[in-house]
Amino acid sequence: MFQLKDKLAHVPEGAGALFFIQIFATLGFAVLYSTLVLYATGHLHFSLKDAAAIMGVFGAFNYGLHLFGGYLGGRFLSNRNLFVGGMALQVVGCAAIAGGTLPLLYWGLALFLTGSGLNVTCLNMMLTQRFKPEDIRREGAFLWNYAGMNVGFFIGYTVAGHYQLAGDYPSLFIFATVGNILAILLAAFNWKALADLDTPLLDAKPANFRLRFAAGLAILIGLVPIVWFLLQKPGSTGTLVKGICALVAAALVFLTVRHPDPRERNNMWAFLILSLGSLVFWTLYQMAPSGLQMFALKNVDRMLWGFEIAPQWIQNINTVVIVLGGPLMSTLFTRLRARGWNIDVPRQFAVSLLLMGLGFLVLPVGIQLADDKGMSAFVWLFTSYVLQSVGELLISPVGYAMIGRMAPRQYQGVMMGSWMLVTGLASLFAGDFSGMIPEPTGSAALSTNSAYARLFAELGLGSLVVGIALLLLIPALRRLIRDRVET
């Protein structure tokens, strides 16, 4: 007990509160992320293609707004104010979706996505400001923050599955609303401890601060109808976002070609190559709440030991693997490196893609061995999720660290933004792939199994090919990636 009190006494003010805030702030997103496609198809009678498209746009907005959230919080509203404002939009959004109508779904999603897309960055910014640059406790604090996020996902997925089995969507979205309210209350109780410590906004004079605050509030509220409008046409919106991503990619290639420093230019080429591999990985990963979930709902025998497994509970496989596997993998890598194993970024990216490919290739095997009704055994889906989750452990933690290492100082902002856009673009592609499955006729499993088997096999083989290509490129990538000029 005394040791625990001693540790807590050395935690910077506000860092402990942010751990618990992170848990409740994640609940609403976990509910919508795991339930949106099921709700759209089961309650609002969307086609699978339309539901997958709206899920793709959901991910694109959520991840695409992250970078803008840091700018808006640091220069206009403060991270603390923007976080609470964003959570307030999420509260209203979840409450609106609980109304159960199509118009309320679109307005609810517009409110929720504006809030969640902007305030995720605010949480990270508030946490990082609790520590000085040289403070060795920073990494541990972010590990705790990541753990808090996964606790929120676990609770959200578990409760979502419970209400899914009962068919009680209104209660589920009310639960998400309450979770968002609790995050706001925790922030209010720790208001002073969460104040910004180092942002450009702190240098503003009172009159200028009020002007910026008003402008930031107008931007926050004004984004809602824009997102609402774009949600109405997910196909056109997806095309627009893909076009923006193509322009960003072309700009990065141009900057790389024109960059004068040879070492930094080589690092930028390595970043672009690894970003392509990352796009493949996250595209398949983002199929979990859409195509994979519909496959689990209609084509997998989810009865295990006499209990029915809700589709949302399956996503907790990922949560458990991440929480338990993260420390184990960190320990394993430390030991392997001590023995001389070269476990670096290119190798981790390559292996993650190989694991993702294997994760998708086991699904056609399960389909081939399905029962007379066409239902695959749950063990195949379980194996797929475990393989994908181990791949995530290899690629996710090194992504942002990679940018800090490879990006020249003057391009760090645009390269960070492009990395976030990769995840948003991947969500759109995942929606496209998920929408390729035809609507079931007769026995759902028997009518769609062949289409699922073909899609999963093609995606799995594609990931394997990219993973093998990265393996072959490892020597070249290692020559490109240099922290300093070697003499």
Image (tube, rainbow, N blue to C red):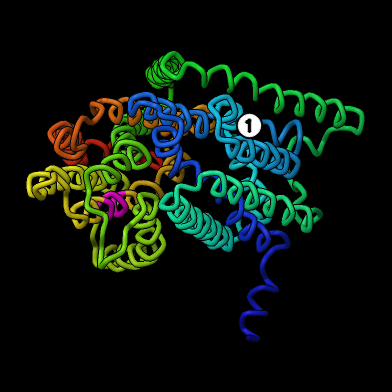
One can see residue 475 in this view = no
- Judge from the rendering whether residue 368 lies leftward or rightward of residue 237; answer left or right: left
Residue 55 image position (x, y, % from top left): 42, 31
Nearer to us in this view, 91 or 374: 374
Q: Is residue 91 above or below residue 48?
A: below
Give SS at disc 1.
helix
Q: Is residue 277 above or below residue 49?
A: below
Indicate whether residue 386 is drawn in magenta: yes
One can see residue 1 in this view = yes
What's drawn in magenta, residue-wise? 385-391
Q: Amino acid at mark 1?
A: Leu
Picture residue at 59% right of the left edge, 51% below the top: 175
The residue under label 1 is: 111
Residue 318 image position (x, y, % from top left): 36, 54
Residue 352 image position (x, y, % from top left): 26, 47
Picture residue at 63% right of the left edge, 35% below the top: 96
